[in-house]
Amino acid sequence: MIDAASRVFNSRSIYCRVSMLSFLSLNDNVDEDLLIAAGRVAPVVVLSSNLSIDLPTSKYFVLADSNDLGSFTVDDVTSWLNDGAEKAILPLALVKLCINILPKEKLLLYLDPMTTSTITDTIRSGISGLLLRTAQSEFDLSAIKRFFSGLDLYVYLESDSPPLPSTIRELSKQSITIVIPTSQLTLSQTTQTHINVGDAFLAPVSSDRPDGLFPTVVSAYDRSGTSLGLVYSSAESVRESIITGKGVYQSRKHGLWRKGDTSGATQDVISIRADCDHDSLEFSVIQHGSGFCHTGSASCFGEFRGFSALQSTIHSRRATAVPGSYTRRLFDDSVLLAAKIREEADELIAAKSQQDVAFEAADLLYFVLTYCISKNVNLVDIEEALDRKARKVTRRPGNVKPQYLNAISREIPALEVSSAPSRSTTGSDLIRMKFANLDGLDKDSRLQLLKRPVLKSDEMIEKVKPIVSEVRNRGDAALLEFTTKFDKAELTSTVIKPPFPQESIILPHDVKNAIDIAYQNILTFHQAQQEKATLTVETTPGVVCSRFARPIARVGLYVPGGTAILPSTALMLGVPAQVAGCREIVIATPPRPDGSIAPEVMYVAQLVGSSTILKAGGAQAVSAMAYGTKTVPKVDKILGPGNQWVTAAKMLVQNDTDALVSIDMPAGPSEVLVISDWTGNPAYVAADLLSQAEHGVDSQVVLVAVNLTPSRLAEIEAEVDKQAKALPRVDIVRESIAKSVIVSTSSLEQAIGFSNDYAPEHLILHLENARDVLKKVENAGSVFVGPFTPESCGDYASGTNHTLPTNGYARQFSGVNLQSFQKHITSQEITQEGLQKLGPVVVTLAECEGLSAHANAVRVRLQG
């Protein structure tokens, strides 16, 4: 196989990858213009022996040079990747050295199709894809695709002529990347011996428009990908853009449109790519001149926001700020700027609430960006540095210089626990839990394991008091002000009343169908909780007592939102309110920046019969529902989860007799406790732990291991690490898992006892005969029984409610249920004969307590 590699990849081989297309050079004299053009649609891949060449792009792969295979080590491959390569393409012998040491997503296997049978499961699980070479243009790839299911597949078809566009298109449909030699590429017209780079790129791309044009999103490369506008492209305009590196599009009225020919607002094209469906394009560009839009603004969607806007502002102030102004002082006085950065960093570290952290981080980032611009460093430079760091496969251990470490005081010391005996001490990048053995643990250490982070309720209540007071006293005016300040939405009214605009609840069919199914399941479970009849008991002959339920008339349901979309919480709160028959259902949820509410939440509000939607979040929303305003109805009970600002406001208003409002329960960070014995599937156990760990860095995650061997614990830990690193929220998971713990127990009784003392929000049982263990559970918000009952089903659609007690409150509180939206009234009816029997007892007890009027109310009837 190495000999074959030598024939294909000679001493200066370079190829580029784009979506389902790659380019491969087979000669020493690579046309630089051709490589630059190819680099606009793909990263470049270079032989390890040619890493010193001047690449036309910062993105590249490295191919192990077949002439030096025997001398390569894992350190060599690590060095290539740390120096910036996105992937390494290696022969089998070198792959075997690298798997389980280097990340699989960084490794591609070079392979001859005739040797696929020699690849083991270990090899398959340690790579992200493979590059196959075959001389057979009609080679059947179906068997290889099945054998390497789930891996990226690249194929180089050895031929004297380039592949036809139809061949590229067909392989693309099969998710196969075809590799084309650069000797068969051209920047000129496609012929029998050469294919134009643009034609090769567009081969898998198709248009569903009658005019054959491709919708094209233009984004600003140097503005974090901010959209500049929507245009159209043709095959001709794309080919010219690839060759010239300038923005060239297709006007539907005037033909080819070379951006900036008349306005001077030209574009440098950095990259061109197709979307996932291969029916539209994205041009990433650097815009010059007045701006992209014909109106002169930076974007057709208005001016930039966020970091892009801040960068423009700082650049502008640097050029125009008058002497003595604050911005000019920052640029002129390096000591002042450095001091401000240190000051803001300290204030960020001291911040506690989510809003305070965001506020202080904004200040710090302003001064950091000012410093960078003073050194002629822009956002694009910072982002490219981040990209380079992200491509590294080795990480610094994360240590800090003593002078900085000593300056930070930890308010809550971490639990000291030992290392699991099965763990490797290498690999500082591992995502893993702490470990504690319950056997032999003293009482104080056991109590420490049961503790959650200290919730400083008093401090938070003091912080929300001004907000609550303002809304209470000034009503809608204060509510609008706080919505602008905290939710970043400029509104004229915070209230929506039914009938809701149909355009506000338009949803994809699959989302609507999923919500409908979840709604029906939750409805069915909560309807079953209804009391069938009034409870009636004759306690004494002639004395009949009864108890019956009535709905709480007006309820406020808090649905966290803003940038998040949480229709599940709206369902969990809205459905039992609907079943209970609450007369007013007010749903409060933060608006998006444009003032709208997510259509998923709007659709649920319509399903459950919401009478009002309050477009507000945080303490201001809680206050408005507790006291009422001119537009917001006052409610009798407030239910729903939220951040610490929401929780503090709920606790504050429930203790105010003027509000006369109750709440569902106190709330803390999300938590899960998983009990697993030898029957637990390590992949399932790890997935259940991570499903809660991704909620936030303060999520509480505990695994109680019942007599598990060190090897089984190691399997679970390996699954946690592997699955966590594949999650989009891996940074959050890394922090929450590091604070989580595996508690080893020697018996099921010991495990259940620990769980009942912990009283988790979610309890998951991966146990033999798990259903029989359920009767031993005394404290838990909700229990998930057996290997095929993930907690996420309860979160969304099984039917049980996901609004549950946290922080150990499962000892005293139930999760939200139908009774959360009801109160119970008792009545009694006594006949004359019944009073004759019961009356003397009442008279005796009333006189014993010195309440003569009570006794008299009975006595006058007995004497009558």
Image: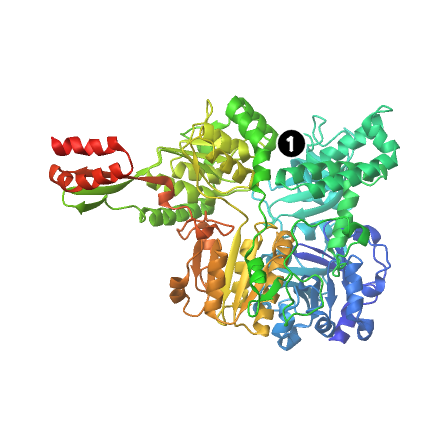
Tell me what residue is drawn at x 60 percent, y 39 percent.
Answer: 459
Say left or right for 470 vs 795: right
Type of the residue with mark 1? Phe
Locate residue 471, reporting x and y percent: 53, 26
Say left or right for 319 vs 509: right
Q: Is residue 731 above or below residue 269?
A: below
* Count of marks overlaid on the render: 1
Residue 224 lies in what quarter of the image? top right
Locate residue 490, reporting x and y percent: 58, 27
Q: Please tell me which residue lies in front, 573 or 294.
A: 573
Query: Can you identify the residue that label 1 sits on?
Result: 301
Locate residue 513, reporting x and y percent: 42, 47
Q: Is residue 523 above or below residue 299?
A: below
Q: Is residue 659 above or below residue 639?
A: above
User: According to the image, what is the colour scheme of the structure?
Assistant: rainbow
Q: Please tell me which residue lies in front, 471 or 580.
A: 471
Say left or right for 11 vs 471: right
The residue carrying pointer 1 sits among few (fewer than 14), some (14 to 19) or many (20 or more) residues within 10 Å by Cα, namely few
Tell me what residue is drawn at x 34 percent, y 41 percent.
Answer: 579
Q: Is residue 127 above or below residue 698?
A: below
Residue 14 lies in what quarter of the image? bottom right
Asked which secondary structure carries label 1, the reply is loop
Say left or right for 362 vs 789: right
Q: Please tell me which residue lies in front, 529 or 293.
A: 529
Tell me what residue is drawn at x 56 percent, y 52 percent.
Answer: 452
Q: Residue furthest bottom?
A: 118
Q: Quadrant of the C terminus?
A: top left
Q: Please tell me which residue lies in front, 200 or 278.
A: 278
Is residue 615 visible in the rendered structure shown here? no
Is residue 498 visible in the rendered structure shown here? yes
